[in-house]
Structure formats: structure tokens, C-alpha cells
Image: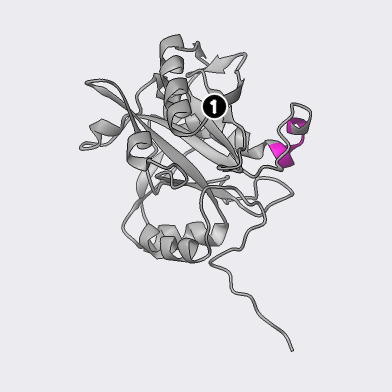
Amino acid sequence: MSKNEQSSSGYPIYRHGPRTKEFQLASGDAEAMARIEEHIEAHIGKIEGVYHEIISDLVHVDIFIVAPTPERNYYTLVTCGMSNLPMTVPEGAENFKYAELMICLPPTWQMTEHAFQDENHYWPVRCLKQLARFPHEYDTWLFAEHTIPNGDPAEPYAHNTKLSGMMLTVPSVVDNIESFFTLTFSEDKEVHFFSLLPLYKEEMELKVNRGAEALYPKLEKAGINEILNPTRKNVCKKTFWIF
């Protein structure tokens, strides 16, 4: 992993090479799973299903699913297991060693096992699982405003989208954000819940070069949040009209 690059906005750029860690079989933590399940149901809604991992590497990552309701007309998917191990955080960020991730999918998204054989339907789930394992694979961390491209150079996640990267954000579709964001397990373990916001290549470039403060107003103006729209407007790409 290279740590020597800096963007024009002054943020470090990390480039991760091939993984060097060997496979390490991991099992789940029943007590942690129960705590996270209770937390999700208290702040988001009843969990309708769980995608269980059969064989896990480094950490056992399950995904809780909250189905759409009239009040929250979208699926909410939340990881459980990323926080079984601490991340490798920089000095001063010791309170953010533990995290879980979430993403929201439209109510029409195909969620069956058969549908997930098609990457057009499965890629958001794949991103949750890959990014939940990522900091443990590379001894690094994930935090708000970190962006992770889909490859180097970034490529679209699937044929049905040109979105090609993720940015972590503080959840915006939860009623009591402050209460949901932090789940205290003990005096020395607080788990923080981050949303994954899919981005286009040009949006990631703006964030890297000018900082998240340059990207957020564009996203807010376009009404874009963590509820996935695979064909949404690219806020950094101009439309040219020919008359």
C-alpha cells in the first residue's frame, strides 16, 4: 500500500496492491449480532431477512435487510460483522476503530437469490461485503468522506450503471441520526454506522481534487442521498444541447 501521494486538496491517496494476507477463517459473534440487530430495529425498522455468509475470511459479514414500508419506501441493507475486529486507525481517531456499513435500494430492486446471480442486481451487496472486509485486509480504516473507486482506474460496477465508486457518509435517511450513528458496546468500543453513497468517476475526481465540501452542495442540489439510483444524474458532467 502506497501512502506517499496527496491530492490537490491535500488529502492522502492510498493505492492498494494485491492482498498479501493469507485466508483466515472467521466466525460470527452472536452477542454482537444481537446488539446490532436490536439497534437497527430500534432506529430503522423490523429486519425481514439476513444474508448469512457460509465461509468467512478475516471477519464474518452478514447483511441485515429491512424491507420497504409506506414510511420508508426502500430497502435498507446493513452489515453485521465488520466491527468484530478493530480497524487500523491513525493517531487521534482511536474512537473510530469499529464500523458497520449500510446502503439503501429502491423498492423495485430484485432481492431474490436467483436475481443475485446477475451482477446488475448483486453489485450493491457485493460492495457492502467487500468494503466491510477491506480495512481488515489492508490494515487501514474507513471513515466519512473516504472514497473507494471500483478498481484503478475505476470501472462501472455493472452493465446497468456507470457508477464506479463509493463514498462513506453519515447516514441521512435515519430519523435520529445522532442516536443511530453510534452504538456503544463498552467503554472502549463504539461502533459507528456509515452509509455508502455510490459516485461517478467525475464526482470522485472532484472530491479528491477539491474536497468533499465541493461535492456535497452539488449532490444536495440534485437531491441525491444514499438511496441508490443506478442511472441518476452525474452532478459533475455537463449536458450539451445541440440545436
Q: Which residue is mark 1?
A: 46
Looking at the rendered structure, the secondary structure element under dot 1 is loop
Q: Residue at x 22, y 21 (%)?
A: 187
Q: Which residues are magenta?
A: 116-121
Q: Residue at x 60, y 18 (%)?
A: 52
Residue 144 sits in quarter: top left
Would residue 223 be seen by someone viewing this image from the given angle? yes
Q: Residue at x 40, y 42 (%)?
A: 2
Judging depth in this view, the residue of 196 and 165 nearest the camera is 196
Would residue 133 be seen by someone viewing this image from the given angle? no
Judging depth in this view, the residue of 144 and 56 nearest the camera is 144
Judging depth in this view, the residue of 53 and 135 nearest the camera is 53
Residue 36 sits in quarter: top left
Relative height, residue 16 to residue 203 (above, below): above
The x, y position of residue 136, in whole percent, is 43, 26
Q: Residue at x 70, y 41 (%)?
A: 109
Residue 242 sits in quarter: bottom right
Residue farthest bottom in this picture? 243
The x, y position of residue 5, in whole percent, is 37, 51
Q: Quadrant of the N terminus?
A: top left
Q: Is residue 118 magenta?
A: yes
